[in-house]
Image: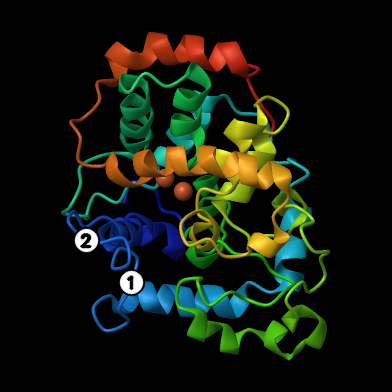
Amino acid sequence: MSTGDSESANHFTKLDQDFVVGRYKEGKSESDFRQYDAKATPHVAEFYRTNHKNQTVDYVLRKEKQYFGLRRGKRSVWEAAEYLNTLVDDSDPDTDLSQVEHLLQTSEAIRKDGHPRWMVLVGFIHDLGKCLCLYGEPQWGVVGDTFPVGCAWSDRVVFPEYFSGNPDANVAQYQTKYGIYEPNCGLENIHMSFGHDGYIAQVMKPYLSDEALYMIRFHSFYAWHRHGAYQYLENEKDREMLKWVKKFNPYDLYSKGNSKPDLAHLKPYYDDLFAEFLPEKPSW
Ligand SMILES: [Fe+2]
Ligand SMILES: [Fe+2]
């Protein structure tokens, strides 16, 4: 570990790997694909037990208030990426890629497929919100699948059985189909479980298009973009944006394992890309 930071940071890369392993099994059928097995992957199960227990409406509102005002200073994208790099766990035998290299793999895969420049940018920045770990947030509050809070949990959320441990299970209003929301009110009006997606979307909100922001904001909302849950909360815009979220997802999942990107060689392209869309130092 190259930083003396918190316990959660220490376990970050290892668990992140496990999520990828859990999702990425070539040859698996669509239905098998995201079947986590509590016995086969006990620390993923334990992660979600803690996540589902603690992601309450109160918790989410508190974290949104704490972070969505962007009062953590100004940083360039490179600075943010360098900061995230301190999360690399060099005791992990499975990868010698830094966080920045992983971001570059995602964005380079998008670039190679000829997608628009804004989508290449999304590839690079979509996980920068993981710096929440360095702010001291626990891992269960930063990574993993996201889901709406304040309404009934779908059984298409990963490990739905663990929601029984969430105090919101005892709040009648939160346990109806629509909960605190109106039918088809739109996902932008929903409070999602707190994590890196929502935070980085907030940082990027003034600068990017809806398509880009949906890719960023909902990339971990698998129950929706992969399993078709929560359609009764969707509005017309969400239905339109879903195809972009789906377009992005394979790059998030499958770009690990491609060859190690050459940062020095790529830097000028990314300097131009960041300058095209973003101010030199966005607020975090
Ligand atoms: Fe992510
Ligand atoms: Fe990612």
Q: Residue at x 43, y 57 (%)?
A: 9
Q: Amino acid at mark 1?
A: Gln
When asked about the image quadrant of residue 11, the answer is: bottom left
Q: Which residue is mark 2?
A: 28
- Residue 206 position, x and y percent, is 73, 28
Label 2: few (<14), some (14–19) or many (≥20) C-alpha neighbours in 10 Å: few
Height in image: 170 above or below 107? below
Query: Can you see residue 182?
Result: yes
Between residues 128 and 126, which one lies in front from this camera angle? 126
Comes first in the chain, label 1 or label 2: 2
Query: How much space separates mark 1 and mark 2, taking CA atoms?
Result: 10 Å
In the rendered view, does 214 fall on the left or right side of 39? right
Q: What residue appears at the point 75 percent right and 41 percent down from the top-left corner?
A: 71
Mark 1 nearby-residue class (10 Å; few <14, some 14–19, many ≥20): few
Per the rendering, the mark at residue 35 is 1
Residue at 26%, 84% in the rendered image? 39
Classify the position of ligand 2 by quadrant: top left, top right, bottom left or bottom right. Answer: top left
Q: In this rendering, would 55 be left or right of 102? A: right
